[in-house]
Image (cartoon, rainbow, N blue to C red):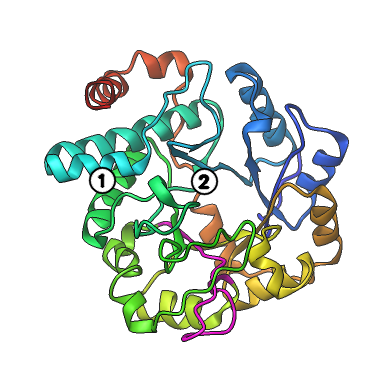
């Protein structure tokens, strides 16, 4: 086992078990995290085996996944609860505020407890984008159009995550919901002025305050503010998110292999631009060749503050094994509420 300080790169693995190339990349000193996808899941036993393999290489890095509920949920079989899309919580809010907040907490708890039982530390959730009805890539991943509703439902979901020992990540700062273009495939441009964005889309980030552990900026250009996408912009990350909104947690880049990141150049120049702008960790997914290039060519001087922030995402409590989790009254109550409501 190799014990090092977590580096600034989060990368993925190819299959259901680690290849020699996966092991080499995970062991690299610039690696600080591994993100899993649906292709990395066959069943719970296999997933537990994979996370144990990763831990055998490095026990100091974050194992993460995009596991929001609805259509963005990587593990859906072999006992994993089918979690509702966040828009369903927003619709419930419009009928019964208190029930919606209880359900949001239950979603967060079930989501985090099931992942942690299989060795996964962290999920990139909640989505804080507003539902303007324009974005197909966001769509029902958003809680609601009203930033106040988004904030309160996200706060309840974050509480559920925390009860199960998991940190949270608000995305996609300052907001991806207004633009129709999908940053996976295009470079979205949001022409609104700064005040319009701060007074609407970005409000959940201000209101959630200290309860936000991490933030992922959008691969969206807001030309009235900066010519660079938010994830490559010191104005958005340093002047606004850190200084104006007082955020002190981890800033992740979105996936550097997405088209929305292409304005910053190749994977190495885009990673360097994201880190220079204020990201603590950069993601490179679905491209082992680019991950190899990044680990080989990235020039990086250790940032002790970023290292400390990343370490704080690791769970501080021991996870319950799957069988013990299913016998736990708290988990059973959360499941019962979700079944009743959804």
Q: Is residue 207 above or below residue 235?
A: above
Count residues near mark 1 (Cα–Cα under 10 Å), then give few for <14, some for 14-19, many for 20+: many
Locate residue 150, reporting x and y percent.
Answer: 28, 55
Query: Which residue is labeled 2 in the image?
Result: 314
Locate residue 176, reporting x and y percent.
Answer: 45, 63
Residue at image coords 47%, 86%: 224
For label 2, the SS is loop
On screen, residue 90 versus residue 32, left or right, reads left
Q: Is residue 124 above or below residue 245?
A: above
From the viewer's side, name the closer residue of 299 and 265. 265
Locate residue 303, reporting x and y percent.
Answer: 63, 70
Q: Is residue 89 above or below residue 215?
A: above
Q: Which mark is residue 274?
A: none
Residue at image coords 31%, 49%: 143
Most frequent secondary structure within the magenta stretch: loop
On screen, residue 246 versus residue 235, left or right, reads left
Query: Which residue is labeled 1 in the image?
Result: 90
Q: Which residues are magenta?
A: 213-231
Q: Quadrant of the N terminus?
A: top right
Q: Earlier in the sequence, mark 1 or mark 2?
A: 1
Quadrant hosting residue 249: bottom left
For label 1, the SS is helix
């Amino acid at each position: 086992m190799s014990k090092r300080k977590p580096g600034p790169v989060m990368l993925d693995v190819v299959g259901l078990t680690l290849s020699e190339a996966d092991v080499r990349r995970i062991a690299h000193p610039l690696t600080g995290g591994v993100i899993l996808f649906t292709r990395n899941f066959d069943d719970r036993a296999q997933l537990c085996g994979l996370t144990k393999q990763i831990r055998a290489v490095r026990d100091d890095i974050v194992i993460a996944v995009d596991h929001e509920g609805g259509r963005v949920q990587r593990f859906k079989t072999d006992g994993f609860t089918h979690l509702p899309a966040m828009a369903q919580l927003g619709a419930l809010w419009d009928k019964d505020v208190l029930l919606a907040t209880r359900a949001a907490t239950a979603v967060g708890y079930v989501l985090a407890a099931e992942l942690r039982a299989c060795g996964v530390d962290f999920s990139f959730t909640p989505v804080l984008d507003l539902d303007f009805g324009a974005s197909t890539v966001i769509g029902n991943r958003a809680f609601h159009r009203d930033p106040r509703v988004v904030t309160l439902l996200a706060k309840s979901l974050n509480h559920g995550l925390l009860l199960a020992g998991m940190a949270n990540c608000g995305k996609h700062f300052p907001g991806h919901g207004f633009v129709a273009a999908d940053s996976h495939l295009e470079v979205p441009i949001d022409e609104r002025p700064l005040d319009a964005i701060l007074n609407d889309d970005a409000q959940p980030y201000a209101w959630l305050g200290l309860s936000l552990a991490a933030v992922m900026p959008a691969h969206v250009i807001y030309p009235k503010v900066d010519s660079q996408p938010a994830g490559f912009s010191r104005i958005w990350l340093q002047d606004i998110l850190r200084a104006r909104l007082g955020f002190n947690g981890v800033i992740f880049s979105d996936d550097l292999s997405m088209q929305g990141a292409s304005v910053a150049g190749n994977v190495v120049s885009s990673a360097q631009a994201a880190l220079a702008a204020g990201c603590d960790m950069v993601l490179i997914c679905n491209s082992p060749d680019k991950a190899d290039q990044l680990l080989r060519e990235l020039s990086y001087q250790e940032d002790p503050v970023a290292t400390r922030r990343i370490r704080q995402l690791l769970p501080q409590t021991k996870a319950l094994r799957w069988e013990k989790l299913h016998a736990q009254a708290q988990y059973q109550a959360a499941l019962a509420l979700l079944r009743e409501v959804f």
